[in-house]
């Protein structure tokens, strides 16, 4: 089984191949691990590999997996369509980073913008966040207006090449 | 003492207040918005009143609904907590007009200290130096004042406080945009567009003194707290006592704070904030509420500040004298927020599916959530505070580090990775950080750690859980029993990389 | 300080010790039996060594396996915790013979104090009165001694302690059976069938003094603990300071305890136990280990006893002097056991599926389990200790009551219902209980509460969960949305009945 | 749906009847409640009835249900066969109250015993528990020997009428 996981800015792949010897060959971005696994109560599992063992705790929250190993926590996100979403966000869409109210819109559709230029501001939990243009370009579509409440993760602005 | 008290707040502070009320045998009335039905603060209460919809204006900022809840529940007094209406003079006046006791200062005191302009006058009258600054409604006058003070300056909402509604302006070209945006926040956040300009001191430290007054001119202090570790003027780590304040400076600071409280005939608990540079200090503002960071004072003095608030409110007298207040050891607090520190500290919401707070010797946790509780988008994202005590600062910091390693919140992202790195940073251990150090230096070090890829085992664990499915019975061994215990593999050694390094 | 220490224990005390080691930056080696793989004490360690099968003899009592783990892991010192091998002179000697440091007294001290006969001699030599008693291998001599002391008497295993291996004999007809069964337990539990007879005092109180010696004749004390609340000679609730000891008596008790420690040139932390009646006291025994109840002393003195143990073991010197040790306030501890208090306190085992320890101001929890952890049948059923502090005893008790209400352990039955009733009992509030009060009076009151039927809502909740099945998505409303909030029903009022009454 | 639950020494019954108005008629030992229920995360539910609501938390551990309401915990046990088991324990079987080692057996099969007489002793977790006869009778069967390890809940002794 192959699955893809968003890890910060990366999308990483994991291949699981059950082995005849009663183990898993697990390949993470080309790094191969030979693992046995015992499922414990409550999302915990014991992973072992030639004499070492580690307790991992995985909590599923939607597409996210909160993983605890030792005293460290990692948050991964299941990528249903492989690297598709990575490509999309690498594209022209700017998403709202959190739910909140759009307090200011500094640009209009068709405007040419430069890298770092403020496009709009969102206020949530008493803080104002300015969304800036990640690169030079032109505003293809503006999907939010000042005063509007928006959810987290929705597209606010689409950019295109200014050419 | 009161028979029944309404807590006009939510989250960890409502839980904290409920603990003391329960201990005193005072019946506790909780209030909640629609999304907070069944929240932890309601579970600690004897009675719960629904205020309205999730939006603060409809619920925790809804004075009419709060008064109705107080009347309906038969509460005799209202504790406002911090945030929401805690420093709203209109609310305090409305509570008193309804014949109830407001557990806090008088409406006049809240109003006077909530306005940076009158607050500065009071401090000066009490003989306490203030940070150079200027007020004015007129743009031209403000521009001239900024020039006179010299850049950088700070633009603040006159009625703001606690780091809310303020902006640093590096040079004259940014002043207008800063005045605009601060004015907008001042109006929406504090209902008054008045602004105030202040000289921005170079690498100041932030030290505050906890005071308690009886409302008739008697006031005492409970020593100081150091809160220099800030991000965007929001406190991140607080401690008592200050590691840098000398005994002589401590005396001058506490004398100044008590002088202000006496000058005002201050009632209840309050905090006088100062900026420090070397042995010099300037009055910054006075907060007329219980502070988020009050636990460090409680640990070092052994006193319960909420209980003291209640006793002053119920009796009009100070239940203790200055000589009863003795410091022992050191305490350090950090705030656990639902925010993604690796992505600009964006606030997070969701359900805290798995939560384990640290416990053990000399560790205190004030939490607003338990496993399964929701973290709504509508409110301040503070989830809990973790506080550690020790005979010395080093001991307290070591305990805090261990406690944060133990803490676990899954289901909603928190700033725990940030805090774990912070308490290991050398300037924190050396108590050498000023209020701008986190942004100036630490964030870059943290970004390097936060941006590192997760270890392969973490990805393997996530993928293996998916492979097994949720239905697999526990105790199942996939695919077979573990191997003999001998030797070691690179993958497991690799997990060792994920111990946090000591950051600069 | 040591670089690496092995903790020869499990459960809450192994976790407690690991906390201090982590704070000090000492690498921690945990050991575990097969059923404890992945247990909380192993998760807090830097390295884990598997000892053997679940049975204590194969694991935590297996000296050879422990020494091998110490050698293999490179540990320099061994902390024995309490129970298991903590007071086993042979283990201490084997650790030292292996070139490692035993964090505790010398094997000779353990042996001398572990035998009630030599321990009494030491106390008398130090000028401390002892409880009237007698020893003897011969049945006829013991029978005669019992007659001389006067019934009731207590039969104890000479090498027993801490309430283990002892039995009260009310009259001569029961003596033989008691001698038989105690002898059997003495042999199986302590490896020596020797017995010891003691006069049973009428309603005594149990007070103990914490001492610390450098092994060269210097010794200090950390005040006393009151442990009069006992069930079957097992401590149930402990506090510091004793609520009944006057200042004069405190001086005499601590002097006596320090005299014994000096007489022995005692090394490390130890506890001298006394029985009290009025202002009189008698030496009972000296425990050569860290006590279960050490947290109350830590809270009141602000000192970390495990750290002090480590410092004495590493340096051979006391890191503090008597004048450094100052009491502040009051602390009370209760022990959370996996036992069914309503059915004769039968030990329980299983998985603690849902666990929430109390938190908040002035509350400390030392826990051996987290949610999802197993509670095996093979070991002492202690799960955790909940400790509350306050400026006064009343405040500490009120906080403990609130904390116990918050505590939740589901999946394995615990004594929480018993403890919640206990801390509400009037003789506990009045500090008027002797060591026999729980069995003489309280158990009957508790049985009445414990035997009451569960409220209808509890049964309805269990049945409704069954009806919905485990697969129903959360947020689902069955069968429709709730009704308007007005009025009240008998069923919900009935739930009010389940608040715990104040018991006699 | 009818279910039976052991509550201490009692066996109690619960009847659930979904109502057309979108609620449950719940009858517990003849006491009728009109309840609506909302399922929350993690075994929690909100029960409401004409304006009052309460949060209940139920944890399933085998046949046992740990129920939290307010600050009180209750442990109930699902009785699969209605009141069958109640009858069985009301009969002649004495079960081991816990796992442990049988340290002493004072009786033999066929012995006549009186109420309160010690039959055998079990040691577990450093404590010795004496099992006494609940009534006058005769030992029909002895299912354990000294030195034997026994699980909790297994039959150790069966009694019959002495007659």
Image (tube, coloured by chain):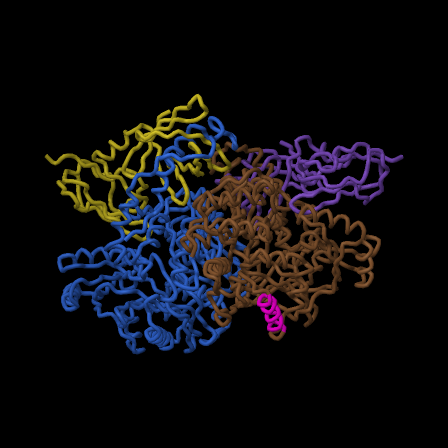
Chain colours: A purple, B brown, C blue, D yellow
The segment highlighted magenta reads B249-263
Check if residue C302 falls in the magenta segment.
no
Q: Position of residue C342 (x, y in %)?
A: 30, 45
**Secondary structure predominantly adopted by residues drawn in magenta:** helix
At 69% from the left and 52% from the top, the residue drawn is B165
Position in image of residue C272 (x %, y %): 34, 69
Q: Pick the residue in front: C331 or D112.
A: C331
> Does residue C110 appear to the left or right of C199 in the view shown?
right
Q: Is residue C102 left or right of residue B180?
A: left
- The quadrant of the rendering that contains the N terminus of chain D is top left
Q: Does B256 appear in magenta?
A: yes
* Residue found 74% across the figure and 37% down from its top: A146
Q: Quadrant of residue C248?
A: bottom left
Which corner quadrant holds the C terminus of chain D?
Answer: top left
- Answer yes or no: is residue C376 visible: yes
Tell me residue A150's x, y (percent): 68, 36
C345 or C184: which is nearer to us?
C345
| Front position in the image: B128 or C176 | B128
Q: Is residue D10 above or below residue B277?
A: above
- Residue D48 horizontal/vertical position (percent): 44, 33
Q: Please, which residue is most extreme toward the left here?
A: D163
Question: Which one is in front, C325 or B75?
Answer: B75
| Left or right, residue B180 beside residue C477 | right
Up-down relation of residue B68 to residue C217 (above or below): above
| Residue lying at 60% horizontally and 53% vertically, measured from the top left | B87
Q: Is residue B36 above or below residue D124?
A: above
Residue B219 visible in image: no
């Amino acid at each position: 089984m192959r699955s893809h996981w968003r890890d910060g800015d990366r999308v990483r792949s994991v291949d699981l191949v059950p082995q005849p010897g009663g183990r898993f060959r697990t390949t993470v971005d080309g790094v191969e691990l030979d693992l046995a696994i015992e499922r414990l109560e409550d999302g915990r599992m014991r992973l072992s590999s030639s004499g070492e063992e580690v307790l991992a705790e995985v909590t599923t929250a939607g597409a996210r997996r909160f993983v605890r190993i030792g005293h460290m926590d990692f948050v991964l996100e299941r990528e249903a369509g492989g690297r598709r979403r990575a490509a999309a966000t690498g594209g022209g869409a700017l998403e709202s980073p959190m739910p909140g109210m759009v307090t200011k819109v500094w640009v209009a559709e068709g405007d040419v913008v430069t890298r770092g230029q403020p496009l709009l501001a969102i206020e949530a939990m008493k803080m104002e966040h300015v969304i800036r243009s990640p690169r030079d370009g032109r505003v293809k579509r503006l999907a939010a207006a000042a005063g509007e409440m928006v959810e987290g993760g929705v597209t606010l602005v689409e950019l295109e090449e200014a050419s | 003492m009161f028979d029944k008290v309404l807590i006009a707040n939510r989250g960890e502070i409502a839980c904290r207040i409920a603990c003391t009320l329960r201990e005193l045998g005072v019946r506790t009335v909780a209030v909640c918005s629609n999304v907070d039905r069944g929240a932890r603060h309601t579970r600690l209460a004897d009675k719960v009143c629904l205020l309205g919809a999730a939006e603060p204006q409809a619920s925790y900022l809804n004075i009419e609904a709060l008064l109705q809840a107080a009347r309906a529940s038969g509460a005799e007094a209202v504790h406002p907590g911090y945030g929401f209406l805690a420093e709203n003079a209109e609310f305090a006046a409305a509570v008193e007009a309804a014949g109830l006791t407001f557990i806090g200062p008088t409406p006049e005191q809240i109003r006077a200290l909530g306005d940076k302009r009158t607050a500065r006058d009071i401090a000066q009258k009490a003989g306490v130096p203030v940070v150079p600054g200027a007020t004015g409604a007129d743009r031209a006058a403000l521009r001239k004042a900024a020039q006179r003070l010299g850049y950088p300056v700070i633009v603040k909402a006159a009625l703001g406080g606690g780091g809310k509604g303020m902006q640093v302006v590096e040079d004259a070209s940014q002043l207008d945009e800063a005045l605009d945006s601060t004015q907008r926040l001042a109006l929406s956040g504090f209902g008054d567009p008045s602004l105030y300009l202040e000289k921005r001191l170079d690498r100041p430290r932030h030290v505050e003194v906890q005071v308690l007054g009886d409302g008739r001119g008697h006031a005492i202090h409970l020593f100081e707290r150091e809160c220099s570790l800030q991000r965007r003027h929001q406190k991140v780590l607080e401690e008592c006592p200050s590691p840098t304040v000398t005994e002589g400076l401590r005396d001058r600071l506490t004398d100044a704070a008590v002088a202000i409280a006496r000058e005002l005939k201050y009632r209840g608990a309050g905090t006088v904030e100062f900026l420090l540079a070397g042995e010099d200090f300037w009055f910054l503002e006075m907060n007329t509420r219980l502070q988020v960071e009050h636990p460090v004072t409680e640990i070092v003095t052994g006193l319960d500040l909420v209980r003291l608030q209640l006793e002053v409110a119920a009796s009009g007298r100070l239940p203790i004298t200055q000589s009863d207040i003795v410091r022992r050891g050191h305490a350090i607090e950090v705030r656990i927020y639902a925010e993604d520190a690796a992505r600009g500290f964006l606030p997070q919401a969701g359900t805290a599916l798995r939560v384990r707070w640290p416990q053990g010797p000399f560790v205190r946790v004030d939490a607003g959530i338990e496993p399964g509780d929701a973290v709504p988008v509508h409110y301040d994202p503070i989830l809990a505070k973790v506080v550690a005590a020790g005979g010395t600062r080093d001991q307290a910091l070591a305990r805090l580090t261990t406690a944060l390693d133990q803490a676990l919140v899954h289901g909603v992202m928190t700033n725990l990775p940030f805090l774990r790195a912070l308490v290991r940073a050398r300037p924190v251990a050396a108590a050498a950080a000023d209020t701008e150090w986190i942004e100036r230096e630490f964030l870059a070090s943290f970004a390097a750690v936060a941006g590192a890829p997760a270890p392969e085992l973490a990805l393997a664990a996530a993928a293996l859980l998916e492979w097994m499915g949720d239905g697999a019975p526990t105790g199942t061994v996939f695919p077979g029993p573990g191997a003999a215990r001998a030797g070691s593999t690179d993958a497991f050694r690799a997990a060792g990389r994920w111990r946090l390094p000591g950051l600069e």
